[in-house]
Image (cartoon, grey):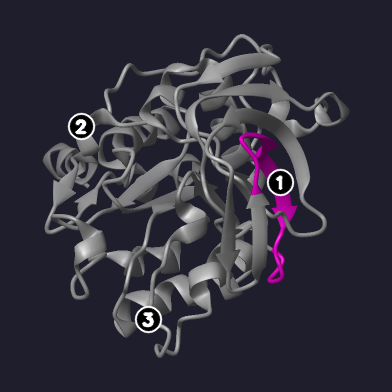
Amino acid sequence: MNPRAMSFLHKYHTAALICLTVIAGMASPQAAEKPHAVIVIGTLHYSPELTMPAFAKELDRLGFSTTIVMGEGNPEKKTTDVLPGIDALAKADVAIFFMRFLKLPDAQWQPIEDYLKSGKPVIGLRTANHSFKYAKDHPRFDWNDGFGRRALGTPYIVHQSGTTEIKTVPKYKSHPVMSHVTKTAWISPGTLYLTRLEGGCLPLATGTGTGKARLVEKPFGAIQVNEHEADIVAWVWENEWGGRVFGTTLGHPGDFAEEAFTRMLVNGICWAVDKPLPGADEKIATWEIQRADKKRKQ
């Protein structure tokens, strides 16, 4: 392949979606071994359209090839052409979801269901456990809670207000995802999201936060939320299809400024695909990114 063609293959391209794909693997056996991470952005909430492309470049640097799937406009307000390019999941080694309240058409839902049932790894950030919001009479209504519960290990409950005090869980500090995470406590600028973890989930980090005491009624039951709450904010699991899961309710743009978080996220993705973890001397990138949605509310 001539140099001009190789240069073309290395460039990013967009066509109603943004694809950051390193295709150098086509040129050498070593590059062909790069795990393919497909990052699916299906919300503007918490500005993943800003944070995840930056994070994708870090994965590229660490030996992945990455594809970002992201449509134009606000995907939560669309019912057609929501996630153009979602077929990229068919060639993914790991899927990273940052979505919220979507109503995908059949053709764009099917690649997600096929991916889950393949038993490949699943990574979910922040709002991913409430990725879908189908009407009660829709055949995929059960996936509103089911995606979070079955694919990631918890449905969405509710979130608190203000910042969240994060602490790592000493019992699981030797888990690969926690490798070289030297901080044991820090502050996340985002609110605490409450979880209802499935059996078998291993908690890696917890958070405490405050909010309004209220009763939350969900299809799966009622939850009394207290003014002061503590919950799991990062965990690992194996879902019903055999896929490794790293789930986290962190993902506020401010979390990407904290190396403890970005290292956990990188470690979680490497662990999910059995890729060697970055060493203690390998610096993991952080970014100062301002939240662009909702006038930077927390």
* Label 2 Cα crowd, 10 Å radius (few <14 / some 14-19 / many 20+): few
Residue 238 belongs to the span the image colors magenta: yes
- In the image, 145 versus 246, the foreground residue is 145
Res 143 label: none
Tell me how far mark 1 sits from mark 2, CA to CA: 33 Å
Sequence-earlier tag: 3 or 1? 3
Name the residue located 56 percent from the left edge and 14 percent from the top edge: 282
Residue 134: x and y in percent read 38, 77
- Residue 2 in the figure: left or right of residue 63: left
Q: What amino acid is labelled 2 in the image?
A: Lys
Whether label 1 touches label 2, CB < 8 Å: no
Q: Residue at x 60, y 15 (%)?
A: 186
Q: Residues within 10 Å of mark 1 (few under 14, many from 20)?
A: many
Please give left or right for residue 33 compared with residue 179 in the image: left
SS type, badge 1: strand
- Residue at 46 percent across and 81 percent down: it is 141
Residue matched to label 3: 135
Q: Amino acid at mark 1?
A: Val
Q: Which residue is mark 2?
A: 295
Q: Where does the magenta region start and end? A: 225-242
From the viewer's perspective, tell me whether residue 57 is left or right of residue 276.
Answer: left
The label shown at residue 236 is 1
**Residues under labels 3 and 1: Cα distance?**
30 Å
